[in-house]
Amino acid sequence: MNEKQLKHLLSEMSLREKIGQMIQLTGVYFDEQAVLTGAVGEDLPPEWIIKYAGSVLGMIGADKIYEVQKKYVEEHPHHIPLLFMADIIHGCRTIFPIPLGQACSFHPELVRKAAMSAASEASSQGIKATFSPMIDVSRDPRWGRIMESFGEDPYLNGVMGRAMLEGYQKSEISKDGYEEKHFSREISDDGMAGCLKHFAGYGAVNAGREYNDVEISQRTFTEQYLKPFRMALKARPAMVMSAFNAIDRKPVSGNKELLKHVLREQEGFEGVIISDWGSIGQLEEQRVVSGQKEAAYAAAEAGVDIDMMSPAYMFWLEELVKNGDLPEALIDECVWRILEMKNRLGLFENPFSGIKQNIVISPDVKSTAFQLACESCVLLKNENILPLKHKEKVFWVGPYVKSQELLSRWAIFGKHSDVDTIQEALNKKEIQAECIQGCSILSDEECKIWQAKAPYVTEKDYNTENLSLDRIGADDTVVMVLGEHEAQSGEAASRAFLSLPKEQMELFERITERTSRIITVILTGRPLDLRRISEKSRAVLIVWRPGTLGAEAIVSLIYGMESPSGKLSVSIPWCVGQVPISYWDMTTGHLFSKSNPDDRFVSRYMDIPNTPLYPFGYGLTYTSFEISDFHVYAAENENVCVSCKVENTGAVPGAEVIQCYAETICAPVVRPAKELIRFKKVFLKPGEKIGVNFTVGCEKFSFYGKNMERINRGFQVRIIIGNSSSNEADSCVIQL
Ligand code: BGC
């Protein structure tokens, strides 16, 4: 439709039809088998709402969506199609690694490619919008949703969020990378609308407890938590989701200052603001309104266009408009944005756009999933044991060696039956290995806590397997595959302890008594306390939740068919007592110095180190790299130019992530210890040497002064080049 036709349509719609567009219902009102991703209230929506609702979430199945859409469009007075949305978080049918893992690839082009495949698969099932990417800066592994984010760094969240969004919406990509350029607003036929979430600050929930309040300063919120949104908004997301949490005690879903002034006016967002599940209704629980009518008023005034699953809009918006409390013009503005989004997706021309029957996982998508799984894994330790040789006698031990549970709770459309187990992957590659489960992922007791399915290893299996474990001797190599259960991360999965499940740790200890040749592979949705594992293993590979092609990637990395290249997107803490922790934590007084570790009155823990077990940006490979020829100069055009050379000095091909950090030397306010400002992943053959250049606009070093004024000039910055946040190859101070 052109603009004129769309405007005409809006002018013809009744108030109820318009309000309908502003309501999103779960699929269970249309189909009993739809997936529920949140709690449903007791009050059923009025019948007219079901008739006019503008969008539906969580419906699965191309056939069902086709039928519901057909009936709906026929019966709707203006034949406006429904928009089906879902949480396609890390793949649709083909499941890629969780976003926390994808970020470890430091390879935005690959992340974008994976998102394109997810969009094609989702679109073929009638899903034309996803609630992804999540770009909440996350530095507290107790929070289960850390798995959905791109980790602790604001810049990395911005780059990856933008890449993923571009992949979903299939907009044109600029040659200049992911920083500056604007893109066309159209979303291609097999693309889907993306949604930046959760705006904003949700990653900082107090004490890592799900749905908790957020207490961060206005400055930290603006500089660190809004940064990824500012960056990803440039790719023109169709939607932004307003978060559950409050900022400065003002819940976001009723926060006009944040949604209208910051998001729309300051950052120029023109798309749809959708509430999180029930977050408008929740204003009553947060006690900032005295009932649902006030909640509806506050959210509409703040500019929330779609109410996802709360009673507020569906029961009260009509009355608020009829009584003159809310102008109909405000409703029109919201509905206009929603109609525009449907139009961007081409739904008026074809309400069934993209729908096909079954999804067949194509070889091309498989290869992207494999590549991304490989590049997401991070080699944390390797004491001359990896890669293994094909002919070596190896035991693969642990509950994940015969398991297909390599996906996550956010893999709604994924199928465990598509996943090869590690044992199958070994067999396919004709690698000699003995596979022993040894225990189940969770004990019965833990299953109850995590509301997980009962363990699947029977008593009988244990007995036979225990005998096999007895055959492991001191010369044998054991690859242990351990980890969290799928149910232990994701939404509503906060943890107070970051330990591995009990039986798995017991199994690990039993193996340590038999051999020291242990390699441990860790599957997880969050950083765990890996001290004991790291101490007793000769090598440790963290693979996150690696997705459909996970087993193949793990086997390929362990046997050196692929070289690990992932770098941590998040610090692995020493223990839970350190969290929240990130490399960009603020500079303090009473500075702890490594040269005087016994000083008492310094900022330190008396019982553990200050530093994490493994820092942000860290990760080993099977080769070695040298960074040299580092130069920095301030160009006349307001840019800082950084260059260096990098050489593969080892014997095998590999990839290195060149990381550039900045540290403000002195400022009127306390600044982060350092901040990542650019990175580049380079793939080099042995002996190959190339140049890496970064151009950074001077404004990227700016910060907010004492009165929140922007400071661009008159300070010094140390520019650092290295291959992790704690490993500096070189640095240089410049004056801005
Ligand atoms: C989550 C969102 C999600 C929505 C729809 C909410 O509970 O916070 O991230 O997109 O449900 O499933």
Image: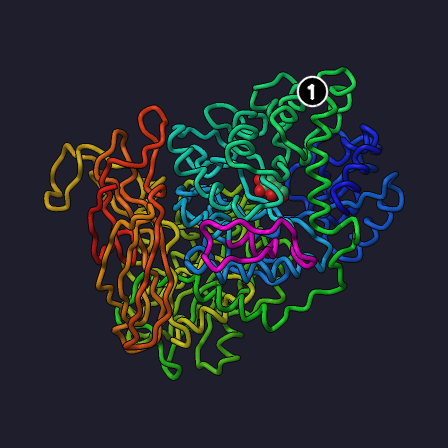
In terms of depth relative to the viewer, which is nearer, 449 or 88? 88
Q: Is residue 387 left or right of residue 552?
A: left
In the image, is 86 to the left or to the right of 678? right
Q: Quadrant of the C terminus?
A: top left
**How many numbered callouts?**
1
Q: Say whether residue 409 is visible.
A: no
Report the residue at 73% width, 40% height from top. 339
Q: Where 72 falls versus 286 (above or below)?
A: below
The quadrant of the picture showing ligand 1 is top right
Residue 181: in magenta span? yes
Above or below: residue 427 compared with residue 677: below
Q: Is residue 637 left or right of residue 608?
A: right
Q: Nearer the viewer, residue 382 or 3?
A: 3
Residue 158 image point, x, y percent: 46, 47
Dominant secondary-structure state across the stretch colored magenta = loop
Give, as a three-letter code, the residue at label 1: Lys
Give the image quarter of residue 272: top right
Is the CB–ligand 1 distance for label 1 below 8 Å? no
Residue drawn at (57%, 46%) of the image = 236
Q: Position of residue 118 (x, y in %)?
A: 61, 59
The magenta span reads 163-192
Residue carrying label 1? 293
**Quarter location, residue 107:** bottom left
Q: Position of residue 125 (x, y in %)?
A: 72, 57
Q: Which residue of the protein is positioned furthest toward the front in this rendering?
A: 636
